Amino acid sequence: MGIALVIALALSLDGFGVGMAYGLKRIKIPLGSMAIIAFCSALAMATSMLFGQLIMPKLTFVSPKVLGAVILIVIGCYQLIQAFQARREEAVPAMASAVAREESYKTLLSIKLNLFGLVIQILKSPDAADIDGSGTISPNESILLGIALALDTFASGMAATMTGVTLYVILLVAIMQVLMICAGQILTGKLSSGFLKKAKFLPGAVLVLIGSLKMI
């Protein structure tokens, strides 16, 4: 239960950043939209864990627990690299043009799934994500946001299953995603920029730590 809670927290920290971004622009996320986001996270986690259960019996060349731990470590390292890259982008020289600086901050998530020819892009600017300009994230807009926040859980959910994490994590991920978004909105402007910069490294570091512990 403890490991499941830590994994759920690590996979939900992106929601904290989204909540803060929306809080700065006073963009509201209604209860219905929150429920859709939670459902997307739970569905992604359940699907990935089911896939993990299906392939575990076929793993004869390596222990599922070891493979799951390795996957968690790889995902964690990838997230750490992304955090380092984001930090470098934030250090855009002052002499750079305003247009260049805006472009460096604009993309929050850009994921290309070549197999389906699908490109999902969510803008970091909250007012751009609020497509209809209503100041509220509608259910339709929350579906896109929910999918983006849930995509990280696919590989992690499969790996978590292999390492023996129970199904409780599905519910925990859904709950933590909503709690992190709410916490981000509440704490908007109350946390130092230094803390926020360091917090970007937390999800990756946690997954690496969990994977390492599972290999022992």
Image (cartoon, rainbow, N blue to C red):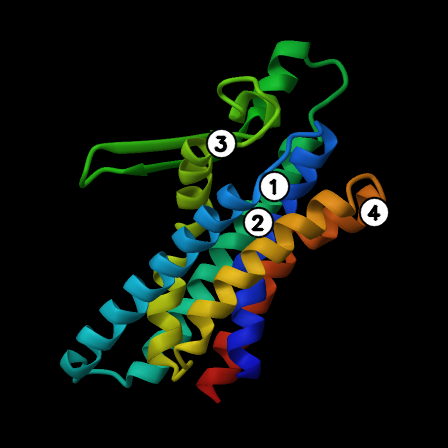
Residue at disc 1, secondary structure: helix
**Left or right: 44 with respect to 128?**
left
Q: Find residue 103 and report its image quarter.
A: top right
- Determine contact: label 2, label 3, CB under 8 Å: no
- Determine contact: label 4, label 3, CB under 8 Å: no
**Left or right: 25 with respect to 60?**
right
Marking on residue 191: 4
Q: Where is residue 199 in the image (x, y as percent from the top left)?
A: 70, 54
Q: Distance between the residues labelled 2 and 1?
A: 6 Å
Sequence order check, earlier mark of 1 and 4: 1
Q: Distance between the residues labelled 3 and 1?
A: 15 Å
Sequence order check, earlier mark of 3 and 1: 1
Marking on residue 138: 3
Residue 119 lies, with reference to residue 207, above or below; the image says above
Residue at disc 3, secondary structure: loop
Nearest-to-viewer mark from 2 and 3: 3
Q: Distance between the residues labelled 4 and 3?
A: 27 Å
- Determine contact: label 1, label 4, CB under 8 Å: no
Q: Distance between the residues labelled 2 and 3?
A: 19 Å
- Determine contact: label 2, label 4, CB under 8 Å: no
Q: Where is residue 131 in the image (x, y as percent from the top left)?
A: 49, 21
- Determine contact: label 2, label 1, CB under 8 Å: yes
Marking on residue 14: 2
Q: How crowded is mark 3: few (under 14 residues within 10 Å), some or many (20 or more)?
A: some
Asked if one can make out residue 97 in the rendered structure from this viewpoint, the answer is no
Which residue is under mark 1? Answer: 18
Residue at disc 2, secondary structure: helix
Sequence order check, earlier mark of 4 and 3: 3
Which residue is located at x 35 percent, y 83 percent? 65
Which residue is located at x 57 percent, y 54 percent? 178
Q: How crowded is mark 2: few (under 14 residues within 10 Å), some or many (20 or more)?
A: many
Sequence order check, earlier mark of 2 and 4: 2
